Amino acid sequence: MIYSFFNNSSMSHVHHFIFPLYISFKLPTDPFISLTDAIIREYPHSHKQLRLFLIFVNLFHALKAVSSYATIVSACRSHVYRQRSCQIISMTDEKSIQAEHVEYIYEESSDKVLKGVSLEVRKGEFVAILGHNGSGKSTLAKLLNALYLPTAGRIIVCGMNTSEDALTWDIRQKAGMIFQNPDNQIVATVVREDVAFGLENMGVPHDEMVRRIDKALEAVHMSERADSAPHMLSGGQKQRVAIAGVLAMEPDIIIADESTAMLDPNGRKEVLDVIHRLNREKGITVVWITHFMEEAAEADRVIVINNGDIALAGTPNEVFSHVDEMHQMHLDVPPMASLANELRNDGMPLPAGILTVDEMTEEVCRLLCPSN
Amino acid sequence: MSIELKQVTHIYSQGSAFERKALDHINLRIEDGEFIALCGHTGCGKSTLVQHLNGLLQPTEGQVLVNGEDINGEHVNRRMLRQSVGLVFQYPEYQLFEETVAKDIAFGPKNMGLDEAEIDQRVRRAMEHVHLDYQKYANSSPFDLSGGQMRRVAIAGVLAMEPSVLVLDEPTAGLDPRGRDRILGIVKDLHHEGATIIMVSHSMDDVASLATRMVVMVNGTIAKTGSCREIFKDHDLMKKAGLDIPSAARLCQELRSKGIHLPDDLYTQEELHEHIIRLWKEAKGC
């Protein structure tokens, strides 16, 4: 009962601190303190020392609660302060992520995985990163939320340098990461608790936590499964739970490393819809690493990584018009871009930058039905 | 080698609160040498179905017949029948465990009780099939390889058992375009050499270029089987099954709706390319 009383309280810290005090001062008459009462009733006079001892015990708890409360408050304040200072930097500076001449070398190999990559991601931008396996794109993703630290150069995320140890947790909260395999990301035995994991670590108050979990699960269409066991879910559903876990942290940036690779078309579409909506409506910056060209085609900007460096960058229309170069890097282009390229090679005067079925339909109609 | 499923029903956790019917009276006959693409929405029962084909799961009701014999039957050589169907799971690279590539591939043949010389031959043949150089990779750790190479090692492990039917559950998932093309190339070669292939796939582009027949599953039942051309034409079915319509098929449909004269069942880029160029040359000629 006491447990649920605390959990339902929006100011649980305060109650943690007041309740033991209340017990200490009202001890002799308090009906709730059954054990103390029982002792007192059993031994009314001869155990004054025990009674005194119990009072001391309770006072000790109260003092402990006061000190831990003070710690929590100061932690929260410093957290708020840091958040605020970060926002000030971001406001004066529209960059969300800034990588400057970043190099990375894995210890065991002598080859540079990244060879001086410089890039910027603006606040609210949706950037897709393409590259074949081993090109360095996953390494780049892990550098962006301080899972790896650059061997040379620096990375600034929301105004925070990833190489500063003290900022690591703030960076990971600001830049949430979603991985490819949902099975490696689920930690709890109930969906709701899995989503709560990050929030609990942040010390978010209970009511706020519940609100965020519900919202996050709704955003990924998993509300109905909030109380299910994750191992009963399909791969796609698990991935949506993992995404909800990141959404619940209300990050400024979401970095996804091939997060749709294991989903079916519907699951992929749902996840993409959610991510695009978060990007559009909440202004969350998205760094989307993918092998699916049609996903990259929907991004604001596409960056192609090859051999540890940026090979191509620009709007999807610009990047995907380099059909032959993309093929040389063992990458696909969206089917319509490739068809347009072949039709152009056969002499059809199609404009550059066709990516979608609708654009293709329009252009082909323009050439085939001159009357329209 | 033919496979036949007769009225196969599978219920998970029967009698518990989690009871779920994953397969509902499935009837399917797969002939020798076919390349079947098994498609459907997540949770439609594809993976459950393929696990029946080599006896990993047993039907709650119904029978699975390989060459006319029930693989779960009493008086048949179950081991032989089950070994004739090789199953490559989703993300098979997670199942690698041996110190060297050669040992990992040899695991299956060893369990079959073959002698050393035969095992060595089979390992070499399997590695050749998946384009891994024996000299270079046989003694390296499978965990030092790239994701795509690890998957090829895992496939080689199944091929070394020399099954006559190969079942692959989403063999290209999570691979980059180069890794995907390699795996599909291997599967295509195996089919040309006479193996019966059953491939579970979400990628309609992969399916379109390889399969001789599609089987579309919806909610534990088979909604339709037919050639890619027939299935891709049926947009309602594709939507119901949660499948992507190949973009060439969508373009074909869109152009037809604008009054351009195209056949209604085009689904590959090459076909569309040919038809559009022809129409354009005709229009220019006028």
Image (cartoon, coloured by chain):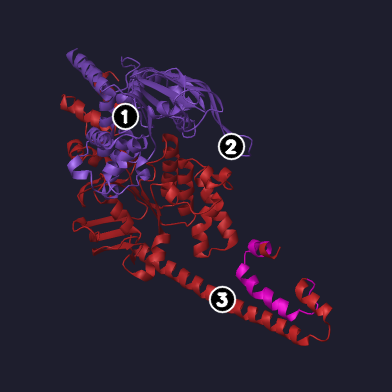
Chain colours: A red, B purple
Q: Chain of mark 2?
A: B
**Amino acid tagged 2:** Ser
Which residue lies at the image location 53% right of the left edge and 48% below the top edge? A217
Q: Which residue is mark 3?
A: A68
Of residue B115 and residue B38, the one placed in the foreground of this image is: B115
The N terminus of chain A sits in image quarter: bottom right
Of residue B112 and residue A56, the one placed in the foreground of this image is: B112
Q: Is residue A19 magenta?
A: yes
- The CA distance from mark 3 to mark 2 is 48 Å
**Residue A220 horizontal/vertical position (percent):** 49, 45
- Compared with residue B262, is residue B200 higher up or lower down, i.e. above or below? below
Q: Nearer the viewer, mark 3 or mark 2?
A: 2
Within 10 Å of disc 3 (Cα), the crowding (few <14, some 14-19, many 20+) is: some
Q: Is residue A194 visible?
A: yes
Q: Is residue A266 left or right of residue A8?
A: left
Q: Which residue is mark 2?
A: B13
Q: Which residue is mark 1?
A: B162
Of residue B142 and residue B230, the one placed in the foreground of this image is: B142
Range shown magenta: A4-31
N-term-proximal mark, 2 vs 1:
2
Which residue lies at the image location 71% right of the left edge and 80% below the top edge? A24
Q: How many marks?
A: 3
Q: Quadrant of residue B159?
A: top left
Q: Quadrant of residue A371?
A: top left
* Callout 2–callout 1 Cβ contact below 8 Å: no
Q: Is residue A197 left or right of residue B89?
A: right
Within 10 Å of disc 2 (Cα), the crowding (few <14, some 14-19, many 20+) is: few
**Amino acid tagged 3:** Ser
